[in-house]
């Protein structure tokens, strides 16, 4: 199968890392194509970044031809997820959504460890949107900038580990969800150090995407996920119209 992995930010280093993390868990028959928008923020660390990044996801969804067998949106805010589902019939998975589901199957409660504290509200809203209020026991910022994760130094990894340890104890959690696609390649190290399941949404989304595709399941085209209505888009967004 062909799996399109969209990094909604415009960091080439992060797109490459996300591609490696996806290929590391993908089945032998899965071709991973990792892409990023042609415009938008280098990293997504706030509502404004996310709004522009969602348009970048729309650009990549509009540009993909032929339609892939599944799509993963590899930013923890899941920007443009509903829009991509509307635009495509292939299954589309967000990494936050995938990680929450995986964590909830492995522990009665999990904690999220993320980047900037200011993004915690965004993760909190996703927890509410996906209905994980009972299983997500805490969301913790490390104040590590997303681009610091392009080449994570031992001090940054130690800070994530310390934050996760405190979260496990304070929240009485049994698992850690990593709140940034840029943390994907730290998963094995952190899991080994922490001794609990550590869930990277990129890997979880790849495996869920493969499962849905193998089951022959596709995005519902009934109701609100029906294809976008054809209409004129103007200005720089003209090519994004259907
Ligand atoms: C992210 C992410 O996954 N990619 C990005 O640019 N920002 N998430 C986050 N919490 O900072």
Image (spheres, rainbow, N blue to C red):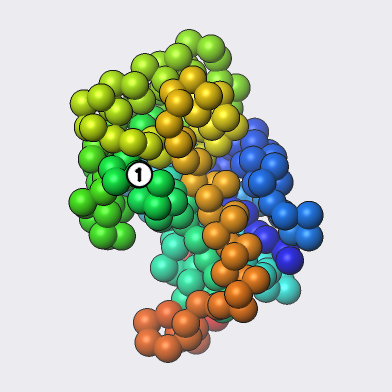
* Depicted 3 relative to depicted 108: above or below: below
Q: Is mark 1 within 8 Å of ligand 1?
A: no
Q: Is residue 19 left or right of residue 132?
A: right
Residue occupying the point 49% across, 20% down: 193
**Residue in the foreground of this view, choosing between 237 and 113:** 113
* Depicted 164 relative to depicted 66: above or below: above
Q: Is residue 97 left or right of residue 4?
A: left
Q: Is residue 179 visible?
A: no
**Residue in the foreground of this view, choosing between 157 and 175:** 175
Image location of residue 176, percent across then percent down: 39, 35
Residue occupying the point 56% across, 77% down: 217
Image location of residue 45, percent across then percent down: 38, 37
Q: Which residue is mark 1?
A: 107
Q: Is residue 87 left or right of residue 162?
A: right
Q: Is residue 192 visible?
A: yes
Residue occupying the point 55% across, 14% down: 153
Residue occupying the point 64% across, 40% down: 21
Image location of residue 56, percent across then percent down: 52, 56
For the C terminus, the image quarter is bottom right
Give the quadrant of residue 17. Answer: top right
């Amino acid at each position: 199968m062909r799996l399109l992995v969209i990094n909604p930010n415009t960091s080439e280093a992060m797109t490459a890392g996300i591609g490696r993390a996806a290929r590391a868990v993908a089945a032998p028959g899965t071709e991973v194509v990792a892409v990023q928008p042609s415009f938008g923020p280098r990293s997504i660390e706030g509502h404004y970044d996310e709004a522009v990044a969602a348009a970048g996801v729309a650009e990549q969804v509009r540009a993909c031809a032929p339609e892939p067998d599944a799509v993963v949106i590899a930013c923890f805010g899941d920007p443009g997820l509903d829009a991509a589902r509307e635009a495509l019939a292939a299954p589309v998975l967000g990494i936050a959504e995938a990680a929450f589901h995986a964590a909830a199957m492995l522990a009665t409660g999990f904690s999220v460890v993320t980047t900037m504290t200011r993004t915690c509200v965004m993760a909190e809203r996703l927890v509410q949107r996906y209905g994980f209020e009972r299983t997500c026991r805490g969301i913790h910022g490390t104040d590590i900038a997303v681009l610091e994760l392009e080449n994570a130094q031992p001090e940054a990894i130690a800070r994530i580990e310390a934050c996760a340890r405190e979260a496990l104890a304070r929240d009485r959690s049994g698992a850690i969800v990593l709140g940034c696609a840029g943390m994907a390649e730290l998963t094995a190290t952190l899991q080994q150090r922490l001794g609990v399941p550590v869930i990277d949404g990129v890997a979880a989304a790849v495996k869920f995407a493969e499962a849905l595709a193998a089951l022959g399941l596709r995005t519902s085209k009934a109701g609100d996920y029906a294809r976008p209505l054809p209409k004129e888009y103007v200005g720089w967004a003209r090519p994004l119209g259907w």
